[in-house]
Amino acid sequence: MKYRKFGKSDMNVSSICLGTWVFGGDFWGGADDKESIAVVREAVRKGVNFIDTAPAYGCGHSEEVIGEALKGIKEKVFIATKCGLEIKGKLVRSDLSPGFVRSDVEGSLKRLGRDTIDLIQCHWPDPKTPLKDTLGELEKLVLEGKVRYIGVSNFGKGLLSEALGVLPVVSDQMQYSLFNRDIEKDILNFSVDKGIAIMAYGPLGGGVLTGKYDKRPSFPKTDARSIFYTYYKEPFWSKSRELVGCLDRIAAARNVTSAEVAINWVLSHEAVTSCIVGCRNLKQLEVNAASTEWKLTQEELEEIESEYRRIFG
Ligand SMILES: NC(=O)c1ccc[n+]([C@@H]2O[C@H](COP(=O)([O-])OP(=O)(O)OC[C@H]3O[C@@H](n4cnc5c(N)ncnc54)[C@H](OP(=O)(O)O)[C@@H]3O)[C@@H](O)[C@H]2O)c1
């Protein structure tokens, strides 16, 4: 495993951060808690010391699973969780009001079985709450010893700058993969300049970039693979086949998997501190964790870039 300094914090985190949305069990076609616990323990054994979760994942279930899995584990594991996203049935609501973020943090501490959260992240922007009110409350939680560092998630450059004007937030968690390169426009270079850690989520495009699908799969309407990762839908799906073909070729020549190539590509940008990868089972973890053991060459990066430009323009 490789480690990177996490922005301006004192944390040295594994470049693979274990993503645990799937552990919540509600958005990914169910999850097996025993397998999820085994994944956390094996990830730690492999040197992964960074886990990302959220109260919104299975209404706290992902955090409960992590709390259970880490019982008795002696290695230091940094926990990043989030606050301010309420999910009730079909209703999804961003609420970064001071009362809501405090109750999220206190709930997370209980579910995780910890005295302190290493990194709390505002999950999604909330246009109704002034940012200074949210960050002011999170700062109080730092002073109370309940939180060590404050970060944001899904904050574009404007909001990130606004947050930095209030408090020294250390990180921004954003979607970044070969299917979604929006943050290349302004966030990545800005983060390097400001010393902000970028946590890249969805590096496998929710699974499509692993190359495991020969035919377009179909998922229930409430599944994240239907509503969040739109790469499973046309017209994107047909184009994505060609790019996956390029990853497959590079993977075959190296005797690795396409998932590893996709993760390796995300980690090739210096601004990316951690690539958050979802792993449903031990087999996926084995593959995904292996991606830090080698690096794409300049020629391979150029091949991917030229295929990308040819396909997506
Ligand atoms: N801040 C935010 O708003 C936000 C949003 C989304 C995600 N996140 C975080 O980022 C993490 C990672 O993103 P993600 O999990 O959504 O997407 P992802 O990492 O792109 O995809 C993960 C999914 O791909 C499949 N997979 C993983 N490794 C595989 C392998 N080696 N071979 C075949 N299939 C494999 C698994 O799903 P199947 O087995 O079902 O195919 C797995 O759940 C999340 O878990 C969460 O912690 C944050």
Image (cartoon, rainbow, N blue to C red):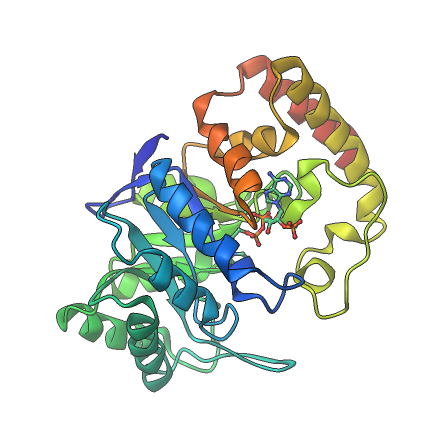
Q: Quadrant of residue 159?
A: bottom left
Q: Is residue 69 above or below residue 91?
A: above
Q: Between 31 and 225, which is closer to the camera in this rendering?
A: 31
Report whether residue 100 is seen.
Answer: yes
Q: Is residue 233 left or right of residue 255?
A: right
Instruction: Tally the numbered discs.
Output: 0
Q: Between 136 and 247, which is closer to the camera in this rendering?
A: 247
Q: Position of residue 33 (x, y in %)?
A: 50, 61
Q: Between 67 and 80, which is closer to the camera in this rendering?
A: 67
Q: Quadrant of residue 118?
A: bottom left
Q: Position of residue 248 (x, y in %)?
A: 71, 25
Residue visible at 24% across and 45% down? 75
Q: Position of residue 140 (x, y in %)?
A: 19, 75
Report whether residue 190 is seen.
Answer: no
Residue visible at 27% across and 68% down? 113
Q: Between 79 and 178, which is closer to the camera in this rendering?
A: 79
Question: Quarter of the image containing the N terminus?
Answer: top left
Q: Quadrant of residue 313?
A: top right
Q: Position of residue 117 (x, y in %)?
A: 26, 63
Q: Is residue 98 above or below residue 72?
A: below
Farthest residue in the front direction?
A: 34
Residue visible at 66% across and 13% down? 253
Residue visible at 59% across and 21% down? 301
